[in-house]
Amino acid sequence: MATRPKILLLDDEQDLVESYATLLENIPSHPEVFTCMAGPRALALLKSESFDLFITDLRLPGIDGLQMLSVVRRKYPRMRTVVLTGLSDEQFRMRAYAMGADLFWLKPDTRDGMQAFQDCVESLLQHTPLSGFRGVQNKSLVDIIQLECLSQNSSVLHIVREGQVADIWMANGNVIDAQFSGLSGESAFREIMTWKSGNFELLPPDTEHPRVIESSYQGLLLDSAQAMDEGRGTQFSMEPLAVEPSPLSLLAETDGVEFLLSLDSARKMESWGLENAEAVAQWIAGLDKSFRELGERLEVGDTQQLQGIGPKCRIALVGREQSLLCVGLNPSINIEQAAGTVKQIASRWLC
Amino acid sequence: MLNFFSKNEPPKLIGLPEGTFTVDPEGRVLTSTIPQWFPSEHVEDIGRRVINAFRQAREVHLPLNELVIHYAALKIIARELRGGALIFLTLKQDETEIPKL
């Protein structure tokens, strides 16, 4: 028997909470609805139970709804979140989405409005299994393929690694094709499965794509694992011995770039064109931390980009998950050129 | 049954302000057009962080005259002003203005 999804509903008005709980318990997936009237109690419940969906009001005593969203997003990134408020204010709607809310909904005052809200909640609960795959994630390929196939999903898994691009087509829980560097079908799939890292993105299904692979996904994954165990994976036997140019030096070939510095999640640094790279690395790490903290304190969402203009250079700081890239540009280039260059470099770095 | 959406005394949510303020090299607020309902400690916090950012940039030999911080809902523009700073806060009305990189 399928387990019932769990919803945590936070609002400081008891009558309203109880009414919503009753209405939500009657949607098709029959969720268990837990209620609470204050942020600290909600946080305690979130710690003790695993929830699929968190619904919060904005105006709450003590910890407000935006602060709750911030905490939930940080601690439980896969949990769906809904803001349900009577506050009809564009600024708060925008800030709620900036804080990671999946849905901002004005408290309905008609039966149709309530039905629409129930439908949206049902839809969010139905899509919960996919919640870990929104956007680009660092997951193992085997994990993603297994979960997609077990869920009987249809999608295109687009993978990028060090400038190489591969695609795996899945339809109704089956792997139907793979393509990489002139290879297709099972040979391409086996080759892709040797990759140990990269960025994965799940794209919408390509319903027109023909089925090339007939084997089951379990068989494909097993074959790939055996091939790697037996050392037949070409990735291991053909590791290039020649020294390749660093990724940053390739990015630095762009016109106008004076220096580049990257910091990964472990704060390992790589730089190009800087004499005092260690000091600059410390500065940008501190700068990023300081303005991230400020963003959380002001409840204005993530730092999207930080730019500096000085007599010696322009700088732009861009982030990807826990990694940072600082681009130093020649101060003589104009704002439009600088923006274009930073965007170009950042998009290549993100790949 | 559905008409239960008004609150007698709703708790306050702090909005985002638009305006300008200046801070001295120690981060003290000198002048401000920021609305009074916006907590002064937030204004002081912004000022201190900006002043620190300018000072630390000088220390690593990358002096800056201007710093722009793009958040999803707010843009902060800070101009260096004889060791202090002139700081503008503007709301981001259009989320697509600054692409997420």
Image (tube, coloured by chain):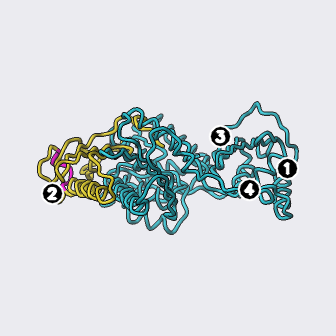
- Nearer to us of marks 3 and 2 is 2
Stretch in magenta: B34-40
| Badge 3 and badge 2 in a common chain | no
Could you tell me which secondary element the residue under label 3 belongs to? strand
Residue ID at (66%, 38%): A204
Q: What tint does the image give chain A?
A: cyan
Q: How many marks?
A: 4
Tell which tag, 3 or 4, sits nearer the viewer.
Answer: 4
- The percent coordinates of residue A87 (x first, y second) are 33, 42
Instruction: Kindly state the secondary structure of the residue where label 4 is placed.
Output: loop
Q: Are marks 2 and 1 on the same chain?
A: no
CA gap, disc 3 and disc 2: 50 Å
Question: Viewer-nearest of labels 1 and 4?
Answer: 4
| Rendering colour (chain B) | yellow
Subunit that carries the residue with mark 2:
B
Q: Earlier in the sequence, mark 3 or mark 4?
A: 3
> Badges 3 and 4: C-beta atoms under 8 Å apart?
no
Majority secondary structure of the magenta segment? loop
Q: Decide: marks 1, 3 in contact (CB < 8 A)?
A: no
N-term mark: 1 or 4: 1
Residue that carries the numbered disc 2 in the rendered image:
B28
B36 magenta-colored: yes
Find residue A189 and name its label: none
Was residue A319 drawn as part of the magenta stretch in this picture? no
- Which residue matches tag 4? A240
Residue A203: mark: 3
Residue A106, placed above or below residue A233: above
- State the separation of the CA atoms marked 2 and 4: 57 Å
Circle 3 marks a residue in which chain? A
- Which residue is nearer to you in this view: B57 or B98? B57
Residue A339 screen position, x and y as percent = 42, 37
